[in-house]
Image: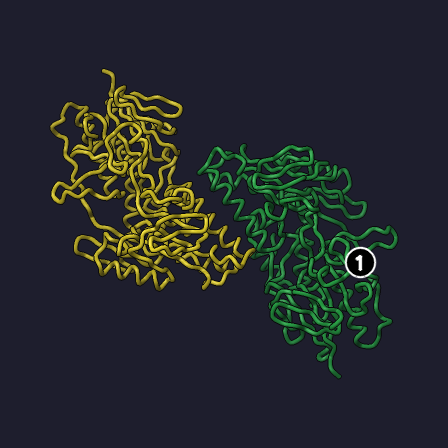
Chain colours: A green, B yellow
Amino acid sequence: MIPPKIIILGAGYAGLTAALTFQKKLRTKEAEVTLVNKNEYHYFTTRLHEPAAGTFPHDKTRVDIKRLINRKKVQLIQDNVVEIRTSDRVVVLENHTLAYDYLIVGLGAEPETFGIPGLMEYTFNRWNINGVRQLREYIEYQFATYKNDPKRTELLTFVVGGAGLTGIEFVSELADRVPKLCKEYDVDTSLVRLITVESAPVALPGFDPGLRNYATSALEAKGVEFILGTPIKACNKHGVVLASGKEIRAGTVVWAAGVRGNSIIEKSGFTTTRGRVPVDGYLRAPGHENVFIIGDCALFTDQRTKRPYPPTAQIAVQMGKLLAENIVVTIRGTKHKRKPFKPVIYGTVASLGREDAIGQFGKKRVTGYPAVIIKKAVDLRYLFAIGGIRLVLKKGRF
Amino acid sequence: MIPPKIIILGAGYAGLTAALTFQKKLRTKEAEVTLVNKNEYHYFTTRLHEPAAGTFPHDKTRVDIKRLINRKKVQLIQDNVVEIRTSDRVVVLENHTLAYDYLIVGLGAEPETFGIPGLMEYTFNRWNINGVRQLREYIEYQFATYKNDPKRTELLTFVVGGAGLTGIEFVSELADRVPKLCKEYDVDTSLVRLITVESAPVALPGFDPGLRNYATSALEAKGVEFILGTPIKACNKHGVVLASGKEIRAGTVVWAAGVRGNSIIEKSGFTTTRGRVPVDGYLRAPGHENVFIIGDCALFTDQRTKRPYPPTAQIAVQMGKLLAENIVVTIRGTKHKRKPFKPVIYGTVASLGREDAIGQFGKKRVTGYPAVIIKKAVDLRYLFAIGGIRLVLKKGRF
């Protein structure tokens, strides 16, 4: 018996969880699992707003995959995916071509530009380690440059496009850091502007009105300005142009207003909606029995409300775990034991900087310090799940 | 009796030393001393290569002038000098106009461009706190950006124009920091290039051949490349063009190949050579009995060799001290007690990074650890001279 080949593309929340679940459940020689990732590390997307603003070292928001994976059970390949060829049952990487029996695609998201001209060139929009590290350095460089050219106060204007979770969490961290940056670079704090621009009429649309108001008031108290109900029409080297025609001159524009699925999936011929593949209850791509899409590339629709679930880490982890369990029972010839995917939404927490947060758990609402603690607990729980207490101690923010 | 007004322009090595000497020697109401400086701090020019490369915090290379000055004895004005009007005996500042009886000009140096096109726009050339802080952030930003655009290896090429003291000390610190930067930004160290370009046929021309060879070998071992006897013909956004016609693509070009006097002096009508005023034995500007030039703006010629002394901190401090003492005796009506300026050159030390240095003291030569200790001792001695043991403990690098 040749063991079936399982290929996992991407070691994000979904792919890594799948790999770790296989590692735990599969017996020796039951299958050959290969995890492909472009970096040698897994990073914590939900915490990238911290290194992006420079309030927490980026190295604490990633972990070497080799430290999590038992390489006797899961093979690791560091490479870039070029194409998925379902007709040949192979994945083409830059330096390898891999055949599969089961393919799990967890390639993650890309920024959604909504066709706004100049957005890719003139904004920071890559929410990964390389992207946020560059943003952090750029922010510091703006402060340092301003002191050499004190007429250019626009260097101290920071526009954040998007008042969803990422945008709000980032602008909160940046607001926390501004006093420290001003001290480090001898800049008068009153010259710094943080402006959040959002096309929707409200910030944090996933939260109820009470919590939304709590969040915007807290951020306004920290000096954040809000321009709501106003899409960005264009980005250029001077800043942004709003739909209203108003221009905001800004040294830094950060794009945090939405993601789409990975373009490799579209290029490989899958049916997609904004880069996301509509998957069935078993997380299969339409028309494929052995190709599964998980994480931000999967469009999973709630059959009751007919609305798709948003791309979150919470759902990605649940998808990875369930899918790996389903594949294990399939390999063992007990396909009837498979379970359809039923996401459980425990709740959502939004950090508002180091000392404030909001949380919504069903009908329960939490603000301030208790919400901060819950947010930290969620992060630590994930660290524990993937790497045990050792990882909690090494990467946790306490 | 109205006490005479003494104005000191610039709180660099020369001006600050003059102010501190007045503070010590003058009795109450003997004179009214005003120190004008554009920043509220004095900085240690001889150590700026450290914060420039990011190996030492910039805040440790400056000190708040208010902490050094007894404001009952010396008035402080933070302002920019616009013009010196000797005919009216006034100094025009941006926000004040000050009359003087004695004027001491210690406005420091500006970069000498030698007419090289593109040099001011495309290089980092400001050796002051604002300039080196910006350079440090820019260097980090290059590493961070490279990871988002790994084909642009030129982002990791750093050209230093000038193999004099500043250029060598800076490139040494940067060479020390490269391994740490590579670790922080996940960059392969073999991709980083540090290139020193010098128009003279040798590096560190002030040192004897044995020490020069020691220094270049030590730096080559750290990965620094030397292109000697080759002037830079032009700088542009891609890097530098050498006199040989060869182009070096470089993300960062640092100019450390020479300084000239302050342009305010030229604008105010003084006779100058490359911005420096040829002063007499009493450090007077030609044709002025009561205007004195000290520090990098003064061109003081060794009457024996007929060669001008180079602009160094060592000489600036000696000028400031002697001049203040001479003015004190003049005010007291004992002009015959004045002493002509006779610089004493104790020796020169060049740092080659954290753990190496060279020093030349007359015929004595020192290399390696002993030279490092001497360099540190020179720095600490200056800290002690201006601010006592408290400043040594606060700002010293041990």
Residue located beneath label 1 in the image: A278
Q: Where does the N terminus of chain B fall, quadrant-wise?
A: top left
In the rendered view, would you say B237 is above or below B97?
A: below
The residue shown at (36%, 47%) is B255
Q: Is residue B325 left or right of residue B120?
A: left
Question: What percent of the width, then of the height, locates residue A125?
Answer: 62, 49
Kindly tell me whether residue A356 is visible in this rendering.
Answer: no
Q: Residues within 10 Å of mark 1 (few under 14, many from 20)?
A: many
Q: Position of residue A147 (x, y in %)?
A: 46, 38
Asked if residue B261 can be seen in this view, the reply is yes
Looking at this rendering, what residue extends furthest in the bottom direction?
A: A1
Is A331 on the left or on the right of B16, as rendered? right
Left or right: A365 as drawn, with respect to B243 = right
Residue placed furthest toward the front: B245
Count all numbered tags in the image, as a single digit.
1
Choose top left, top right, bottom left or bottom right for residue B26: top left
Whether residue A171 is situated above or below residue B148 in the rendered picture:
above
Pick the front one: A79 or A350? A79
Q: Tell me the quarter of the picture where residue B83 sits.
A: top left
Residue type of the residue flagged with mark 1: Pro
| Subunit that carries the residue with mark 1 | A
Task: Pick whichever, B8 or A5, lies toward us.
Answer: A5
- Pick the residue in front: B222 or B156: B156
On the image, the x and y values in percent for residue A114 come to: 70, 46
Judged from this view, the residue extending furthest toward the right is A304
- Give the percent coordinates (x, y) of residue A72: 64, 76
Q: Is residue B60 left or right of residue A82?
A: left
Compare residues A103 and B370 and report the one nearer the observer. A103
Q: Secondary structure at mark 1?
A: strand
